[in-house]
Image (spheres, helix red, strand yellow):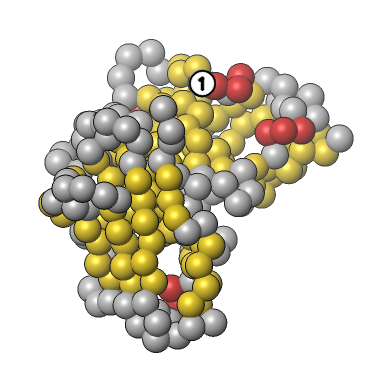
Amino acid sequence: AQSVTQPDIHITVSEGASLELRCNYSYGATPYLFWYVQSPGQGLQLLLKYFSGDTLVQGIKGFEAEFKRSQSSFNLRKPSVHWSDAAEYFCAVGLSGNTGKLIFGQGTTLQVKP
Amino acid sequence: NAGVMQNPRHLVRRRGQEARLRCSPMKGHSHVYWYRQLPEEGLKFMVYLQKENIIDESGMPKERFSAEFPKEGPSILRIQQVVRGDSAAYFCASSPLREPSDTQYFGPGTRLTVL
């Protein structure tokens, strides 16, 4: 069955430090991969997505992610974290076929220390 | 272009009552998805609809839950005879196409509390 694993439930980094959020997926076909961010009490906003081409994807707010097929991973990175990046981050896999449903990981909560 | 709209934002129901959650997709979007987020968990797919059609309801509980997306008006997620375990945030998303690579745009969610 398809699944997405985000191994880190909570991460705390200092403002200005670099960030990497891990995401591993299990899916037999070519995956369509997404990172969303959710601020408290809000809906989800798309940060970036991968579906083909260059395996390093640039997104909004200075985020990037790299697709590594050999490791079944799609880790999210940011070189310098800002206090406003504190939020919950979700990795998701889109399934091929007639349905466009997304399979989400359980999320990683990011805290930013001043 | 207004985003995905959901109402109400917060809904309180007593056990046994009905809950109706509404979702208006973005203009030009004809594909609607409903997801449920239980406390401390990620989002779980419930149902995928197009206008007047349910395409995939594999994530819907077998009883008490139903969804529709009529020709006119918003999509409705209906929960009959609510129980405490239904307390969650319910998110609606819409997309213009149904390609798996297509972006789904999420609404702010409806937070249902069952007393």
Q: Which residue is mark 1?
A: A59
- The image shows residue B7, relative to residue A85, as above or below, that is below
Left or right: residue B84 versus residue B101 is right
- The image shows residue A15, relative to residue A52, as above or below, that is below
Q: Amino acid at mark 1?
A: Gly
Left or right: residue B88 versus residue A53 is right
Residue at the (33%, 41%) spot, across then down: B25
Residue at the (38%, 13%) spot, across then down: A54
Query: Quadrant location of residue A67?
Result: top left
Q: Position of residue B63 (x, y in %)?
A: 25, 77
Quarter the C terminus of chain A occupies: top right
Other-residue count near label 1 (Cα within 10 Å), few / some / many at <14 / 14–19 / ≥20: some
Closest to the observer, B54 or A16: B54
Residue at the (46%, 17%) spot, across then down: A56
Closest to the observer, A89 or A26: A89
Tell which subunit mark 1 falls on. Answer: A
Closest to the observer, A47 or B80: B80
Residue at the (41%, 41%) spot, across then down: B4
| Mark 1 residue element | loop
Q: Position of residue A70 (x, y in %)?
A: 37, 29
| Numbered disc total | 1
Left or right: residue A112 versus residue B74 is right
Q: Is residue B39 visible?
A: yes
The residue furthest bottom is B16
